[in-house]
Image: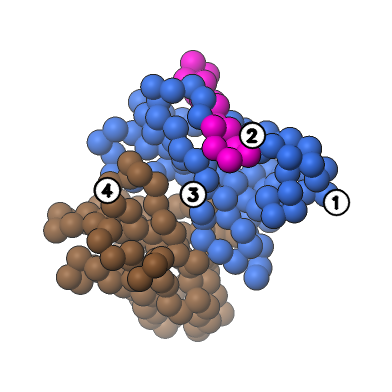
Amino acid sequence: GESVGLHLPTLSVQEGDNSIINCAYSNSASDYFIWYKQESGKGPQFIIDIRSNMDKRQGQRVTVLLNKTVKHLSLQIAATQPGDSAVYFCAENTGGAQKLVFGQGTRLTINP
Amino acid sequence: GAGVSQSPSNKVTEKGKDVELRCDPISGHTALYWYRQSLGQGLEFLIYFQGNSAPDKSGLPSDRFSAERTGGSVSTLTIQRTQQEDSAVYLCASSLAQGRYGYTFGSGTRLTVV
């Protein structure tokens, strides 16, 4: 399928290396955050979430870090694989708000 | 169904024509969202439905855009008098509750206005 986000920030890493994708969020009142992965031609897929009462959460090969002081969110992917190539979006939600607000996205490319 | 289903997957239309995009959410999901994703852009919120409450239409870019959700399930996004700038991928998502538990997205409808 066609790729989306041709003008997105990009990150290239070697297969097997760790990658870190960063996101700055805008609303200091946001209390719930999610990372999504979007492969070409598909809708975004949930990866991991974190609430504002935590600063770190781990999943399978992924870790999300939250720094509320500087309103920064990061996604760490360990031992990247070719299947990790995708566009990654962070999203934030403010308590009581009805919708998620998405960041611009980062394209991750895994080099063999 | 097992996931969020959107149809058609691709739609090419002539400028000025009306189009309807359909979304079948996951059974039991009370919240349904439409987003638009233009090339090189992130996800732009369009409209949100929650149960029987009045929809949040705050993201609709013009009065040419409208959406409805019948019976709390299927939703249709309608774009009247399409313009070239409407070309984008239109994504539908559903969730168990409003915004708090992450959405499940469909694969989207790629709309091309020529």
The residue labelled by disc 1 is A112
Image coordinates for residue A1, horizontal then vertical, percent: 65, 70
Up the image or down, A54 lies above or below B52; here it is above
Q: Which chain does tag 3 point to?
A: A
Front residue of B13/B11: it is B11
Q: Which chain does tag 1 point to?
A: A
The local crowd at label 3, few if under 14, some if 14 to 19, many if 20 or more residues have their Cα within 10 Å, is some
Do marks 3 and 1 share a subunit? yes
> Residue at the top extreme?
A69
Residue B12 can be seen in this image:
yes
Front residue of A14/A23: it is A14
Q: Secondary structure at mark 4?
A: loop
Q: Which residue appears at 65% of the width and 53% of the height?
A: A86
Front residue of B40/A111: it is A111
Horizontally, residue A56 falls left or right of residue B53, namely right
Q: Which stretch did the figure color magenta?
A: A58-72
Q: Colour of chain B?
A: brown
Q: Which residue appears at 45% of the width and 52% of the height?
A: B44
The residue labelled by disc 3 is A46
Mark 3 or mark 1: which comes first in sequence? 3
Q: Which mark is residue B97?
A: 4
